[in-house]
Image (cartoon, grey):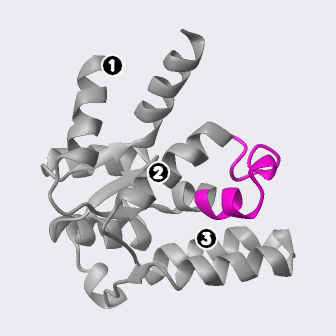
Amino acid sequence: MNKKLNTYASYLLRNRKDLIITIDTNILLLYFIGKYDTGFIEKFDRTAIYTEEEFFLLSEIIKNAREITITPNIITEINNLSKRLNDNIYFDIFRDILNKINEKYFKSKILCKNDCFYNFDIADISVLELAKIGYLVVTDDRKLVGLLRSLKYDVIYWSEIKNLLWKDILK
């Protein structure tokens, strides 16, 4: 199964003519923290489950994407999770990254009308809306992955990538 996942992820990342992606909150927070200080990834409580290797892999994915788009809901979640850093250098990096990322807005009153509203938060529904218009989703949210895959949208489940990384490290 891992070979299948590796082939699937490779296909999604390499064979799409225009790689346009959206990155969910926790994975994008990994990127923000890694840009700030890779040594801090495993020390910050919200990114401690990730490694520097994962940050470098994510950086490559981002570098190869033609476009990265997120929603204000994702930005707000990252900002709220980051506030405990209380470091102006981090927030300068935060601002610089945001200047390079596209932002797509969906009205909350529209997102609330989605059938998934009772089971998913607004940020997840905004990611679903990006998937509907062709964005490859990168997330570590198993429940969101299940929804997106059931609807036949392209999604990379970060935990599967993480497992592949560890298998490569242990070889």
Q: Could you tell me which residue is drawn at 64 percent across and 84 percent down? A: 95
| Pointer 2 residue | 60
The numbered dot on residue 2 is: 1
Please tell me which of labels 1 and 3 falls first in the chain.
1
- The circle drawn on residue 13 is none
Q: Amino acid at mark 3?
A: Ile
Q: Is 42 contained in the magenta span?
A: yes
Q: Earlier in the sequence, mark 2 or mark 3?
A: 2
Q: Nearer the viewer, mark 2 or mark 1?
A: 2
| Other residues around mark 2 within 10 Å, as few (<14) / some (14–19) / many (≥20) | few
Question: Does 46 lie within the magenta span?
Answer: yes
Q: Residue at x 32, y 90 (%)?
A: 107
Tell which tag, 2 or 3, sits nearer the viewer: 2
Q: Is residue 50 visible?
A: no
Query: Eyeballing the image, is 26 above or below 11?
Result: below
Residue under circle 3?
A: 78
- The amino acid on which the numbered mark 1 sits, given as a three-letter code, is Asn
Magenta stretch bounds:
31-49
- Which picture quadrant has residue 156? top left
Residue 8 makes an appearance in the image: yes
Contact between marks 2 and 1 (CB within 8 A): the answer is: no
Q: Is residue 41 left or right of residue 2?
A: right
